[in-house]
């Protein structure tokens, strides 16, 4: 039956679990770590828990059974933990990236998502053939849950052709497979069956870039960097909504932001001012308060992506100017109560980088920032699931942190435990196996006392007061080899 852990041993045990789960002796975040494995679904009793509820830290006891939080203690408990200073938060979500949409990227970065506590992600422009190679790897007990977008629409001279192709020309553009290229509403109608087939996941990504500057069209140095006309985007959005599809628009400038709103898109996947590839005056990226209010009225969500700014290596004065614009844009969107999602668009990173960048920017109160990352964004990616909460019926997925992230955000850097739908995630196969077998020693009914009667409450308390290491059954919970890594 469950045993209580003496306070003097609790911190040492948690730190030991942290070392095991994080694989600190291995290389970090590059696919070199041992893969995560998941235990069997466990029934949990978390006594004296503290958890983030989307606004503040709550206190009480939590119970898990069948992969969800439940109102009462399960009849059999596999895992009992007495918590004091530790804090539980829901896993993070990444609303804009591209690093898991190929086999190579999955191998390099999927483990990093779990390392950094990011369990949910959206990959926003994948080649259908490449995504087919990794789709079956997602949504498993020990992998991130991923939405893949393979319907990616831009103009015949549009972004991201210059990024995808070494020599972006009209001829090479026609040969690529990742994008659907259209320039007019008439071409949209002809291409719609192909776009619709690619949009099996329910979302289309469309590119709008510098549309307010027609003089850029036809310039060789701008080939592959532009996007759809507002008229074509409007026709695409209307067609998509008729088929109950979501449209996510890439934008660059504040004018693009306004055109995307006018077209009626559902998502805007960049905050204007995330980059300045043309060296424009920063005011080109400042959205108006009226635009922010229109986004709120229409229910258009905006993905932040401020962590990507430094990847473009702007000069210090330009970086400072862009950060000022980003603060102003976020303030206006907040004032209007527009919907925000957390997304980094940092190929070498995850949503954790975005959370840190936003915290450093100081544009969002920390409780709101944590709520966006752990509740609003997961629910936007998987609206049919109960994510980011600890009430009965919510999926029992969480990170156990050493302290309160509202006071010190660095607690997010090294989760002590990662639990996904009631399963303990670890990089040691032996630990996962031991966790799966633990019910044999921790969920047995109380033994009968002499004379055939069950031990009373006093006897149970006496047993519970003993350190876990004093019970022979504790050996069964240890890894088969402490050297395995």
Image (spheres, grey):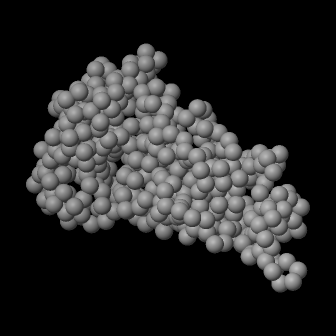
383 w.r.t. 290: above or below = below
Q: Quadrant of the N terminus?
A: bottom right
Across and down, in percent, residue 90 comes to 53, 50
Note whether residue 100 is visible: no
Q: Residue furthest top?
A: 317
Residue occupying the point 37% across, 62% down: 384
* In this rendering, position of residue 402 left or right of residue 257: right
Left or right of 292 in this view: 325: right
**Residue 80 appears in which quarter of the rendering?**
bottom right
Residue found 77% across the figure and 45% down from its top? 11
Residue at 22 percent across and 61 percent down: it is 244
| Residue furthest bottom as drawn | 452
Q: Nearer the viewer, residue 64 or 424?
A: 64
Quadrant that contains the C terminus: bottom right
Q: Is residue 363 left or right of residue 113?
A: left
Using residue 378 as the reference point, say whether residue 473 is left or right of it. Answer: right
Is residue 190 visible in this depiction of the protein?
Answer: yes
The residue sitting at 48% across, 53% down in the picture is 389
Q: Does residue 389 sit above or below 133 in this rendering?
A: above
**Location of residue 43 in the rendering, given as x and y in whole percent from the top left corner:** 63, 67
Query: Toward the viewer: 392 or 476?
Result: 392
Measured as percent of width and height from the top left, residue 219 is found at 23, 33
* Horizontal and vertical percent position of residue 145: 48, 59
């Amino acid at each position: 039956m469950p045993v209580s852990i003496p306070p003097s041993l609790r911190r040492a045990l948690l730190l030991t679990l942290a070392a095991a789960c994080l694989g600190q002796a291995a290389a970090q975040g590059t696919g070199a770590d041992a893969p995560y494995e998941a235990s069997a679904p466990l029934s949990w009793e978390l006594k004296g828990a503290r958890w983030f509820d989307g606004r503040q830290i709550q206190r009480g006891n939590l119970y898990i059974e069948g992969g969800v939080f439940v109102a009462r203690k399960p009849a059999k408990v596999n895992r009992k933990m007495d918590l004091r200073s530790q804090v539980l938060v829901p896993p993070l979500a990444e609303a804009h990236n591209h690093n898991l949409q190929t086999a190579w990227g999955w191998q390099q970065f999927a483990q990093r998502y779990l390392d950094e506590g990011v369990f949910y992600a959206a990959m926003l422009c994948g080649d259908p053939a490449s995504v087919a190679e990794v789709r079956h790897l997602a949504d498993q007990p020990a992998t991130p849950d991923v939405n893949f977008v393979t319907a990616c629409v831009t103009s015949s001279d549009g972004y991201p052709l210059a990024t995808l192709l070494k020599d972006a020309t009209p001829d090479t553009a026609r040969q690529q497979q990742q994008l659907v290229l259209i320039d007019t509403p008439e071409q949209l109608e002809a291409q719609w069956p192909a776009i619709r087939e690619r949009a099996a996941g329910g979302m289309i990504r469309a590119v709008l870039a510098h549309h307010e500057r027609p003089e850029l069209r036809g310039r060789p140095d701008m080939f592959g960097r532009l996007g759809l006309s507002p008229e074509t985007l409007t026709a695409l959005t209307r067609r998509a909504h008729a088929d109950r599809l979501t449209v996510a628009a890439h934008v660059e400038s504040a004018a693009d932001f306004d055109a995307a709103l006018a077209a009626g898109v559902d998502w805007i996947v960049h905050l204007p001012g995330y980059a300045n590839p043309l060296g424009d005056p920063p005011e080109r990226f400042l959205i108006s308060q009226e635009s922010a209010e229109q986004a709120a009225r229409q229910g258009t969500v905006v993905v932040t992506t401020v962590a990507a700014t430094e990847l473009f290596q702007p000069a210090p004065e330009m970086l400072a100017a862009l950060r000022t614009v980003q603060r102003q844009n976020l303030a206006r969107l907040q004032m209007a109560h527009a919907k925000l999602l957390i997304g980094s668009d940092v190929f070498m990173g995850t949503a954790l980088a975005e959370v840190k960048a936003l915290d450093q920017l100081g544009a969002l109160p920390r409780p709101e920032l944590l709520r966006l990352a752990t509740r609003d964004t997961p629910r936007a990616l998987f609206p049919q699931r109960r994510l980011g909460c600890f009430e009965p019926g919510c999926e029992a997925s969480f990170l156990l942190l050493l302290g309160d992230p509202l006071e010190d955000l660095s607690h997010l850097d090294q989760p002590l435990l990662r639990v996904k739908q009631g399963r303990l995630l670890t990089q040691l196969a032996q630990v996962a196996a031991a966790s799966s077998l633990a019910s044999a020693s921790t969920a047995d009914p109380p033994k009968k006392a002499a004379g055939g009667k069950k031990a009373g409450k006093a006897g149970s308390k006496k047993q519970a007061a003993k350190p876990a290491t004093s019970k022979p059954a504790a050996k069964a919970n240890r890894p088969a080899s402490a050297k395995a890594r």
